Image: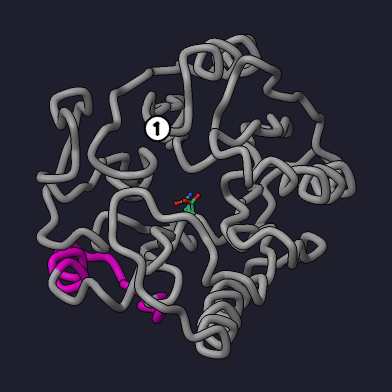
Amino acid sequence: MPSKKALVRRPSPRLDQGLVSHIGREPIDAALALRQWEGYVEALRAHGWQTVEVAPADECPDGVFVEDTMVVFRNVALISRPGAQSRRPETQAAERTAVGLGLSINHVREPGTLDGGDVLKVGDTLYVGRGGRTNAAGVRQLRAVFAPLGARVVAVPVSRVLHLKSAVTALPDGTVIGHPPLVDDTSVFPHFLPVPEEAGAHVVLLGGDRLLMSASAPKTADLLAALGYTPVPVDLTEFEKREGCVTCLSVRVRELYE
Ligand SMILES: NC(=O)NCCC[C@H](N)C(=O)O
């Protein structure tokens, strides 16, 4: 049954100590981060999403990036085993919330590593980024869990950014969008549209023609508006300083059998 639930997790006061891999470390304004997170949650709610808070993990600087804790396909959640050791404690409370929603649970197991941010769903295709956080065993386990449910799992290389979804996301019609200098190989996607800004590569489909995206990508917002979409911009500067983006602050659950 279609559902519009979104898991979110409020930022840790220690967000400043969050990981950075591909960019320099700039200081975080924790109060501003909290306001930006509240604005993000409000934008989801304003577009009909019921937000469900995962218990805070204040001891985990990167806990707000809750997308990385699982991959949801149909009514199954594959609980991740994050590629960064410091992020592994984040999954426990996220799993409890997934159970509470009625999702069936599977786990990525050692030696597999996989971050939810490396998995992009386009219809029944799951693109998975093989890169800094997701290894070959993680890809194999993703395939083993979701192929029997009808998913086509396509592994793609990711070396220029943190996660696959730092490089590309997809529009409602399945067109994959990305900022070409940051995409390893645009030819793996059947329909690819280049966008002019790094932050423009990230959209969350709110429903209908509405696209939640970062206010840091005004040229891409204009491009997408010219294609008939309605951009819904949110300020995310404090999360972008820790390599987060609009997708990573929630896990959207669209099919629940209640
Ligand atoms: N899915 C995502 O885009 N997650 C962003 C995670 C950022 C965090 N600082 C990390 O390096 O793990």
Would you identify the image quadrant in which residue 5 lies? bottom right
**Rendered-image quadrant of the N terminus:** top right
Determine which residue is flagged by label 1: 132
Q: As drawn, is 37 to the left or to the right of 204?
A: right
Q: Nearer the viewer, residue 25 or 170?
A: 25
Question: Which color mode does the image show?
Answer: one colour
Q: Which kind of residue does numbered mark 1 sit on?
A: Gly
Q: Is residue 170 visible?
A: no
The spot of residue 45 in percent (x, y) is 63, 75
The spot of residue 197 in percent (x, y) is 16, 62
Would you identify the image quadrant in which residue 115 lies? top right
Identify whether 72 is placed above or below 9: above
- Residue 115 in magenta? no
- Residue 223 in magenta? yes
Q: As drawn, is 64 to the left or to the right of 107?
A: left
Q: Residue at x 62, y 54 (%)?
A: 66
Q: Is residue 237 visible?
A: yes
Q: Which residues are magenta?
A: 220-236
Q: Residue at x 46, y 79 (%)?
A: 28
Specify few, some or many for label 1: CA neighbours under 10 Å numbering under 14, 14-19, or 20 or more. many
Identify whether 255 is placed above or below 204: above
The spot of residue 97 in percent (x, y) is 83, 51
Q: Nearer the viewer, residue 34 or 111?
A: 111
